[in-house]
Image (spheres, grey):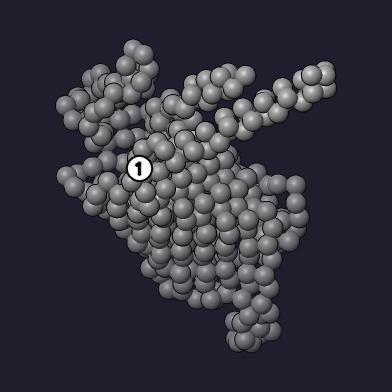
Amino acid sequence: MGLLSVVAVRMRREFCAKWRSGLLVLVSLLAVSGAMAQGGPPFRTDDPDTPGDGNVEVNFGWIGDRNPARGAYQVPDVDMNYGVGSRIQLKYELPIAIEEARAIAPSAIFPDGQEGVVVGDLGQSLLGIKFRYFEHHAGDPWFGRPKGFWFRGDPNEKAGGDAEEEKPPTFELGTYPQLYLNNPTRAVARGVVANGPDFYLPIEISGRVGPIRYNADFGYHFGNRSLPQSWNRGFVVGHEFSESTEAYLEVYDDQDANRLPDGRGVGAFATGGSKSREATIGLGGRQALNKARTLNLLLMGGRSFQTVAATNSQPSWIAYVGIQVLGSLKHHKADAVSEDLGAK
């Protein structure tokens, strides 16, 4: 066999080995049993739960928010999360964003009426890091030296670093700093997204009371010269009917904390108007689509519980429809490497 033939055979074997390794990792995302939690997609309110060390959570969502004058959509929104240790989660989220200005007939409020306009572009990139710094388990003291504090050691960690099987925590506390960044497109100039960067800092709480699960999210959104600052408050309460089915009720409130002068935004993000507010109530949940609960259907629908009008930002409806994929890269990494070496 000539030198070129030997090289070709070796390259083909290496390519096939890498292809098999990549396929094995992809399959692993649908082969590892997953765990669901009440906060996060499909809800606006988040919680301090994290995926777990080496675990992956990817949410593909189709999101809508509409009132008589305007609509905002993410079609789709791709939300990727990765667990580092038992208490940290890394996040990257990127939507395809659409802004709609609905046609409005001339009136006393809109003398010239309003023509319908729809624009779309790449949305903002969202980077986040969630840190659950306290969790309480049944039997733990609430005061003194609680085992759940991160800086006193994690009671869920063995000496080898693997999490022990035990009852879920009765109370958790964490934070989730998030940074919004504009991508190098014309989305800001076209009024598809707000002008960034901006920063969001929440405190998140979750817990259990008998069969009821709840979580709360209280945060402050630090805007910029083109985007008002705002307060975000959310509360979710519901029940896990089985390991595969969950249903929850959410109340959420997002309200501007200040007003900005005219001329600092485009379209729905134009400044100079009154303070904006969205106060919504929604019903939603998750349903596992496979036995391992690694593929889940996410649903949520709701509307504002305040007066809805073309002159305010209260939505006549909100909705989230999505698919969640759960899995682990850590537990199959050694298998992928072994397969790769074996092929060589």
Q: Is residue 99 above or below residue 174?
A: below
Q: Position of residue 22 (x, y in %)?
A: 58, 33
Image quarter hosting the N terminus: top right
State left or right for residue 184 relative to residue 229: right
Foreground residue, 70 or 2? 2
Q: Tell me the SS state at disc 1.
A: loop
Q: To which residue does mark 1 refer?
A: 292
Foreground residue, 10 or 323? 10
Foreground residue, 239 or 303? 239
Q: Position of residue 5 (x, y in %)?
A: 79, 23
Identified at 18% across, 47% down, the residue is 211
Residue furthest front as drawn: 1
Q: Position of residue 243 (x, y in %)?
A: 27, 46
Q: How many marks?
A: 1
Identified at 67% across, 26% down, the residue is 13
Image quarter hosting the C terminus: top right
Task: Name the kind of residue labelled 1 in the image.
Answer: Ala
Q: Is residue 298 visible?
A: yes
Identified at 63% across, 72% down, the residue is 101
State left or right for residue 335 relative to residue 87: right
Q: Is residue 91 above or below residue 337?
A: below
Q: Position of residue 65 (x, y in %)?
A: 51, 65
Sort mark 1 into few (<14), some (14-19) or many (20+) by Cα contacts within 10 Å: some
Identified at 64% across, 49% down, the residue is 124
Residue furthest top as drawn: 159
Q: Is residue 219 visible?
A: no
State left or right for residue 240 relative to residue 337: left
Foreground residue, 205 or 64? 64
